[in-house]
């Protein structure tokens, strides 16, 4: 959930929206009444896409990766002749990346990155989200400036269309950030539950701290800020999102990945 700012090519605010689940989505189950009251959330079908939304599934992965590879070309340095044998290199730089030396620029032009790690993470995340019953759509989030958002009540993860134009690094980061929010909901009881903390690191780098101070979070509650802080602190660990989804989220009809279905459980 976030926004990508073209100025430095960096991700900006990722805004969490966690609507209260509808009455038909939530059951209250008594588990040892003298000790605790636990919430069981039954996953329902995702809400229909809004006009202009494009549903993204694992089947669409080849087309998505082709679009990302095209966008990645814009991050490669280009040489501009200035006359008298002089050359100027022009390139985009993410806020967290240091400036490149001439040697690094020339090496980058000769051997462009493949972004294989990002593509593998995107493929894994889409597959795991689909299995969990999450609808991933390319479409505008409800909150301005957000590059993505997780809507628990709608079982829908949104990514703003222009995030694709930012390339593989930004898209993988946004998708992983939102997958962490999905896992936060699953930790609470199911896809439709309000997210809760997973107990991950909360240490932010300076860029993520700046994002969390974006005006998009001006009206966020302290709880929402902490949920965002956890997602920001871990969004760059691209292998983490699939791991959390496998651990926290039940696929429809299954208690855990690869295990026989046990019906709705109590967490």
Image (cartoon, rainbow, N blue to C red):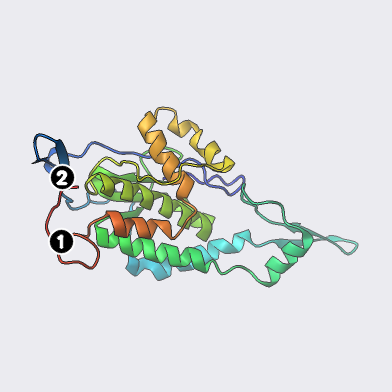
Compared with 20, 187 (above or below) is below
- Residue 175: % across, % down: 41, 54
Give 147 or 29, whichever is nearer the viewer.
29
- Residue 111: % across, % down: 66, 71
Q: Quadrant of the N terminus?
A: top left
The image's mark for residue 253 is 1
- Residue 40: name its quadrant: top left
Q: Is residue 106 left or right of residue 122?
A: right
- Residue 4: % across, % down: 51, 46
Q: Which residue is tagged 2?
A: 40
First in sequence: mark 1 vs mark 2:
2
Q: How many other residues sit within 10 Å of disc 1, few (<14), some (14-19) or many (≥20)?
A: few
Give 171 or 121, whichever is nearer the viewer.
121
- Residue 177: % across, % down: 42, 50
Residue at 25% in and 44% down: 188
Q: Is residue 30 left or right of residue 92?
A: left
Most extreme residue toward the right, as rendered?
84
Q: Is residue 11 visible?
A: yes
Q: CA distance from mark 1 to mark 2?
A: 15 Å
Label 1 residue SS: loop
Label 2 residue SS: strand
Residue at 33% in and 65% down: 127
Give 184 or 172, whichever is nearer the viewer.
184
Residue at 13% in and 38% down: 23
Compared with 245, 70 (above or below) is below
Q: How many other residues sit within 10 Å of disc 2, few (<14), some (14-19) or many (≥20)?
A: many
Most extreme residue toward the front, as rendered?
34
């Amino acid at each position: 959930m976030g926004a990508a700012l073209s100025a430095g090519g960096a991700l900006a605010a990722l805004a969490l929206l966690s609507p209260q689940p509808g009455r038909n989505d939530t059951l209250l189950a008594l588990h040892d009444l003298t000790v605790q009251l636990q919430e069981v959330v039954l996953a329902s079908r995702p809400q229909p896409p809004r006009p202009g939304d494009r549903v993204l599934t694992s089947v669409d992965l080849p087309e998505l990766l082709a679009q990302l590879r095209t966008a990645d070309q814009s991050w490669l340095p280009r040489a501009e002749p200035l006359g008298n044998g002089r050359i100027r290199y022009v390139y985009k730089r993410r806020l967290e990346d240091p400036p490149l030396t001439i040697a690094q620029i020339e090496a980058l032009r000769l051997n462009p990155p493949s972004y294989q790690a990002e593509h593998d993470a995107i493929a894994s995340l889409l597959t795991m989200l689909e299995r969990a019953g999450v609808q991933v759509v390319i479409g505008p989030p409800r909150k301005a400036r957000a590059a993505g958002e997780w809507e628990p009540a709608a079982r829908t993860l949104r990514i703003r269309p222009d995030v694709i134009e930012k390339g593989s690094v930004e898209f993988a980061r946004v998708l992983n950030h939102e997958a962490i929010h999905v896992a936060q909901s699953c930790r609470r009881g199911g896809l439709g539950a309000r997210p809760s903390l997973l107990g991950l690191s909360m240490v932010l780098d300076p860029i993520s701290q700046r994002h969390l101070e974006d005006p998009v979070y001006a009206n966020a509650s302290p709880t929402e800020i902490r949920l965002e802080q956890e997602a920001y602190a871990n969004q760059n660990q691209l292998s983490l999102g699939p791991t959390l989804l496998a651990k926290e989220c039940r696929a429809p009809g299954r208690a855990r990945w690869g295990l026989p279905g046990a019906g709705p459980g109590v967490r």
